[in-house]
Amino acid sequence: MNYRSDIRNIAIIAHVDHGKTTLVDAMLKQSKVFRNNQVVGELIMDQNALEREKGITIMAKNTAVVYQGVKINIIDTPGHADFSGEVERVVSMADGCLLLVDSIEGPMPQTKFVLRLAMEMGLKPIVVINKVDRRNSRIAEVLKLTEDLFLELAISADQLDFPVLYASAREGTAVTELGMKGKDIAPLLECILEKVPPPKIESGPFQMLVSNLDYDSHKGKIAIGRIWRGKVAPHDPVVIVGADGSVTHYEISEVFTYLGLKHLKVEEAEAGDIVAVTGLDKVNIGDTIASPEQPEALPRIEIGEPTVEMTFGVNTSPFAGREGRFCTTRQLRARLYKELETNLSLRVQDTDSPDTSLVKGRGELHLAILVETMRREGYEFEVSKPEAITKIVDGTLVEPVEVLTIDTKDEYIAVLTEILSKRQAQITDMRSDDHDNVRLVFHVPTKGLIGFRNAFSTATRGESIMNATFLSYEPYHGDIISTRSGVLVASEQGIAVTYGLNNAQGRGFTFIEPGTLVYEGMIVGLNSRPKDIAINVCKEKKKTNIRSSTSDIAIKLTPPIQLSLEQAIGFINNDELVEVTPGNIRLRKKLLTQGQRLRNSSSSRRSVKKQPI
Ligand SMILES: Nc1nc2c(ncn2[C@@H]2O[C@H](COP(=O)(O)OP(=O)(O)OP(=O)(O)O)[C@@H](O)[C@H]2O)c(=O)[nH]1
Ligand SMILES: [Mg+2]
């Protein structure tokens, strides 16, 4: 077995927001891959529009820097638990990893998830305690907790012997000893060269595993992955070994390697490197591309199962087809099935209705990002309330359960425990510090977390942080009775006016501005009582000839609550839908007229002997 000393392949893994992408910025800047006057900004790798808006990484991405003549291929991964499939997809390209841990937050549930994954893949981790510049950092304690995590997760003894660096990714510095003054990120790059094993290379005919796909309007599909054996050059004949073992013959068009943000066209690439190749229009993630001389498949990538599902259907609202470019069943289905090519932890299933598909993902955010992406591409459709996916194991109904970690203040403990107990959560840990900060840990069924984020932000006035990570499947704990009050439903189609909305505000909160087009059955607000009520928000004040002393006083409306897409998805109940178009997000009842809803509720009352309390 040979090694390539001129390459290192590393993945950067961590809990959400611990600074992975910022650390990549620091490495890119230090290695001078940019022109001196080039404005590159922050979070350079988060190039997708939604990533930039949300300030989170959604897709794993490759880049590379050269340090002391050695090329370091870097894979930046997302830290949010909903995008864990992305981490699972790409870690097999690496030989080592940087495990980042925030110097205040310490190891979090997702830190454990990604470290376990790295250990299982046999990667050698380098621990980077990040954000050491932050006031209140508790570095020694965080290091101790990280060591405990290693003890818990290590598979072999040598995994316990890991180097530790202390970094401020934002300032672009890293040091090997606590207390040293950092001046640049070089100590980290040196540590990577020294501690990450150089890639092993097998001699023999070409073989690479496809870990990612990209598209280019000129080049077509781009397959990205690591070469495990042999060499590849433009015009080489190759075969693709598919999931079913099928072998298809192709010719490589072009070969690229990474440097900074660029793809470099090369004449040849060798085992150990991470490359992008074009010319293979039928390739999928997980396939092996190999020389026809020895077409052996590499083990396919294993991805965890989805935990949450919702329906995506053709828009059936009275406003259907007005705003979207792609509105038909065929277009919607084709788009969803196309998504499966790159979004590995997603599943799409046909339903009894030809207009509706069932889409399964790793969490509400995973699905919401897909909804938002499609909306921006011009799709128009409707989605249902997300539901946790249950299954039968050995004759028992089981459901997904998650670990929920909340960082909050003492004053919110009571309200949070109350909200969460209705959602079947059980507290498993509670730790406070001397400054009224407290960390609460719960085990909660996934179904109890749906829509929880809205309630959580309101209850803690946006001052707390929550994170949830899949724990295990457990026997079904029973249904949760809706915790939300009723809604205000428009009783007529038309344009909402101040007078009508003012009446609605007498009942609760409204979601729309005057001038908004509404249809019968559209949800326009939240009732303060448990039941839904129909209300005519288009109703004008009756004109009279008598001038009253108050008639000239303008009505002052309370500003409406504007729900974001994620909030809207978390808000709706089972008998409601979110209508998504490029221009609008509307909430609606599934049954639009009051008559239909009344008939439905009386027939369902007849079929249930005892009403739930
Ligand atoms: N004070 C301080 N802030 C940092 C440091 N590194 C990152 N941050 C900040 O932490 C936030 C999150 O940084 P990111 O680099 O996006 O974190 P990430 O791990 O890539 O996040 P995800 O990809 O969404 O999981 C940003 O606001 C950064 O500016 C650091 O060393 N010190
Ligand atoms: Mg990131």
Image (tube, rainbow, N blue to C red):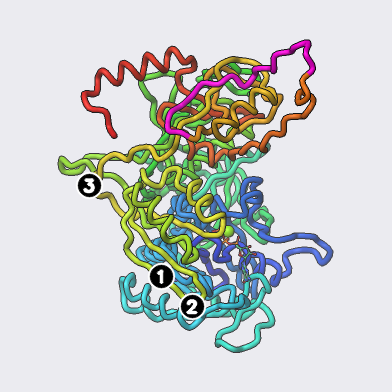
Looking at the rendered image, the disc whose residue lies closer to the viewer, 1 or 2, is: 2
Mark 2 residue element: loop
Instruction: Examine the image and state in which quarter residue 478 appears.
Output: top left
Asked if one can make out residue 420 in the rendered structure from this viewpoint, the answer is yes
Of the 4 image quadrants, the one containing the N terminus is bottom left
Q: Are marks 3 and 1 in contact (CB under 8 Å)?
A: no
Q: Are marks 2 and 3 in contact (CB under 8 Å)?
A: no
Q: Amino acid at mark 3?
A: Pro
* Residue 312 placement, left or right of 243: right
Position in image of residue 112 (x %, y %)? 40, 65
Asked if one can make out residue 292 in the rendered structure from this viewpoint, the answer is no
Sequence order check, earlier mark of 3 and 1: 1
Q: Is residue 329 above or below residue 158?
A: above
- The residue that mark 3 highlights is 475
Instruction: Examine the image and state in which quarter residue 553 appears.
Output: top right
* Residue 286 placement, left or right of 583: left
Looking at the rendered image, the disc whose residue lies closer to the viewer, 2 or 3, is: 2
Q: Amino acid at mark 1?
A: Met
Mark 1 residue element: loop
Distance in Å between CA atoms under marks 1 and 2: 55 Å
Query: Which numbered dot is residue 1?
Result: 1
Circle 2 crowding by C-alpha within 10 Å: few under 14, some 14–19, many from 20: few
Of the 4 image quadrants, the one containing the C terminus is top left
Q: Are marks 1 and 2 in contact (CB under 8 Å)?
A: no
* Residue drawn where x is 69% and y is 23% of the image: 497
Q: Amino acid at mark 2?
A: Asp
- The residue that mark 2 highlights is 434
Is the residue at mark 2 in contact range of ligand 1, meaning its CB lies under 8 Å from it?
no
Distance in Å between CA atoms under marks 2 and 3: 38 Å
Q: Is residue 475 above or below residue 193?
A: above
Q: In the image shown, does 251 or 525 lie closer to the viewer? A: 525
